[in-house]
Image (tube, coloured by chain):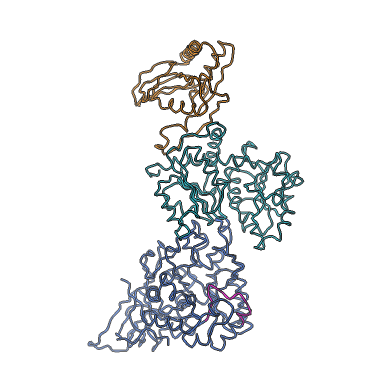
Chain colours: A cyan, B blue, C orange
Amino acid sequence: MGLNRKDLLTIASLSADEIHLILTTAESLKEVGGRDIKKVPALRGKTVVNLFFEPSTRTRTSFELAAKRLSADVINFSPSTSSVVKGETLIDTARNIESMQADIIVLRHSSPGAAENLAGAVRSSVINAGDGWHEHPTQALLDLFTLKEKKGQIEGLTVVIVGDIAHSRVARSNMLALTKLGAHVRVVAPPTMLPLCIEQFGVSVYYQFEEALVGADAIIMLRLQRERLGQALLPSIREYAKLYCLTPDRLKLAKPEAIVMHPGPLNRGVEISPSVADSDAAVILNQVSNGVSVRMALMYLLSGSVRSDGVNE
Amino acid sequence: MTRQPGPTRFETILIRGGTVIDPGHFNGPADVLVQEGKIIEVGRPLQTVLTESQDVRTIDATGWVIAPGFVDLHCHLREPGFEYKETIQTGSASAVAGGFTAICCMPNTQPVNDNESVTEFILNKAREADTARVFPIGAITKKSMGEELAEIGELVGAGCVAISDDGRPVMNSLVMRRAMEYAKAFGVPVVDHCEDLHLSCGGSMNEGIVSTELGIPGIPHASEEVMVARNLSLAHLTGVHVHLAHLSTARSVELVRQAKKQGLPVSGEVCPHHFSVTEEAVRGYNSNAKMNPPLRTDLDVQALKDGLKDGTIDVIATDHAPHAAQEKQLEFDSAPFGIVGFETALPLTLRLVEEGVLSLEQAIDKLATSPAKLFQLPVGSLRIGQEADVVIFDPKEEWVIDPVQFRSKSRNTPFGGWKVKGRVKHTLVGGRLVYEDR
Amino acid sequence: MDAQEMNRTLTRISHEILERNKGLGHLALVGIRTGGEFLAQRIGALIGQIEHAEVPIGELDITLYRDDLSLRIDQPEIRKTTISFNITDMKIVLVDDVLFTGRTIRAAMDGLMDLGRPEEVQLAVLVDRGHRQLPIRANYVGKSLPTAKEEKVRVFFKELGEVDRVSIVPA
């Protein structure tokens, strides 16, 4: 069985079986990261282009490391060093990159749907590394991987997602991924940070953090973007922290062995208290290393679906 | 002042064998005789005797409908300033290809049509194009900035038939009140693009389940409805006719319905795209489904149809908004709002006839008669002595919409590939044949 | 080859391995997934019985080292590589079920080298069916089986719920 698709654009378009395949492949690949020589030749001769229109050192580095561990050549391309500023459209930029024989383009863009638009315009495989508020599928996959690693399985788990759901691609991808694999998802946020029709994602909505935490197996904390303050979504960081910061006392409301996840970078003292971030419950650093395995798995699986001569299945 | 299509040599035109529908006046099989640019006779058999020697162009309209040329109260011709999207010439050509013989163009040009020199420029260009009649709409405020009133008296004097700040709606309700009061002196309607820009907050599509799934910032229904409500209150306060452009939500329709029951001087307009497709068309990040107001939901579509049926909505307007391909190729949130509308309006409206929402006569009324009356334009009828602005269409002809064939300079439409029914065959403006389907 | 024959063959190979390496010192078995992994376990058990000591056994997945990845439409499934001991300075006996073109063994050797620097690498196979495309030869061969190139050789394992046997499937 393979991942019979050219691109990885959304969690929404993946089946549960495909998600399981990616996770199983990532499990096998995790061993590579533990070796002295952390490199295998699977993607030797392939070219991966990291096309990042938004700065994100973490995600970009993770993709870069994943590609390099598979022996692919990696080119990093960001708007400040390109002609994008001169009014070139995304598609033009991408076609240029494609003519450099890129096999995989990893795209981070501030516009929702950018990855979908790009995928339709180029023959290279496209991996969505975050498009606006829309999706961040690899983050959700690495979160699933971490959950599975820590909890054995995902089905039946109660997972709480906390924070600015409305403006979070991580939240969207995670809601979709977790519900596809049979987890119970609770979202908790001030109502100003919950999008319309959120219940249609099959999640339970809470406004009180404490209520949402009772019986939780895992808690995913979202980063609070400080620029939201000017948009009348919040009165102050102080009040947000008071109501939605994950503190040791609040964590006690969850199951005793509950784990705490965060996509990073952390706002210590805002959405997560330092003592929780540094506790054994926090698996934030595991998420980072798992991110590399999951991205390796994706690149490996996608590289099978497009042959080097450009013939698609 | 508005008779742009000039008094060149007229030919005598005899339109035979069709059905004449002149809403509220005539509905039945009849021939139409046009001479000296005017409607001379409507009837069968014709009383007028044409001598053999006379040079007569005969149009065989058997099976076709002969109606007053359509009147569009809402379009964007982009000239001056954005000639790469459309010019008055290409826009007029597109209009007559869609059966529109009179079009009212919004003032959001560069410079804004907020003074008589811009109005005159537009009218001169329209005279040169010599195709459709162009009736400019002047700005409400200087540069449409929403602060100081434009010189409305001068604008009307130069030929503007209404005032509007269209896509940059007046947010300050006091300024809107003053504009309406001031417009009263000149007897022109005030047109508002009802949108609370704060509520829209940079959104790109309808706010709802689809925007949530796609991660696209949403424009709530309330963004339109609060401004509809404001404008209705101001119409009540000032007694001035307010025309509500491109209504898109069920509650907007209901607000107008109640206002009309109370006798307020208000009229409502909808666009074919708003009653033909929903927010679902945005999936796949199709920027040709991006318009403002945005495509809404099934419930809203139904309410717009109900509003058309019961007369709450007076007119169908196109909001023809051409944009260049490279602009629409941008990412969804960066692409401009709007679609071209002239050449798809008739078949989309005829779908309502097919569905039984409107009779054919009502549909023609919403496209021609009613808009002409609302803006007091000297068109929209086939009575004897009228300027012969006529559309002849085949209500049964099936065709596939192909944007490449558009006369408009732009191709931005979500209806490409749609199989539709109803095709414009001939269009006459002032007794001259300005469009013929070949 | 039936179950009994398979067992006798593996017993002989176990003895040969011990003979050649003069006992268990620094010896380890690495089975190539999936067939080789069962054979390595069995040889390991047999050696254990003979020497009354345990030989380290690992499993190697060679998928990431294949030379035909970019030619395939469907990516082959990756399984886990589990080698829990340090292979540096060990005598490693690679174990596989069928030796054919030699490409799998080439990939396995590359994979092994990425994990450390063994003192020596030897190769044990149940069946050598010929048609080598690379200069590779097994140190321990269960049975040499002349085949046509188009034929397929299948090994059945009781570990997979089958009856132990080797059979040739005609093209």
Mark yes or no: residue B372 visible. yes
Residue at 44%, 52% (x, y): give it.
A94
* Closer to the camera in the image, A173 or C117: C117
The spot of residue A138 in percent (x, y) is 55, 45
Residue bounds of the magenta highlight: B163-177
Magenta region includes residue B174: yes
In the picture, measured across the screen, residue C151 lies left or right of residue B215, that is left
Q: Position of residue B89 (x, y in %)?
A: 38, 76
Horizontal and vertical percent position of residue B355: 47, 67
Q: Is B51 left, or right, of A244 in this rendering? A: left
Q: Is residue A20 above or below residue B390?
A: above
Instruction: Point out residue C35 in the picture as x, y percentages from the top left corner.
Output: 48, 24
Does A64 sit above or below residue B45?
above
Residue most toward the right?
Answer: A249
Residue B201, placed above or below residue B80: above
- Name the residue rendered at 51%, 18% in the picture: C91
Q: Nearest the camera: B84 or A185?
A: B84
**How many numbered marks does the figure carry?**
0
Q: In this view, does A249 lie above or below B378?
A: above
Residue ID at (52%, 63%): B278
Check the image and name the residue furthest to the left: B53
Q: The C terminus of chain B lies in which quarter of the figure?
A: bottom left
Seen from the viewer's position, the closer of residues B369 and B176 is: B176
Q: Which of B50 and A104 is in front in this view?
A: A104
Q: Looking at the image, can residue B297 be seen?
A: no
Q: In which quarter of the image is the N terminus of chain B?
A: bottom left
| Residue B65 location, quadrant | bottom left
User: Does the stretch in magenta take in B332?
Assistant: no
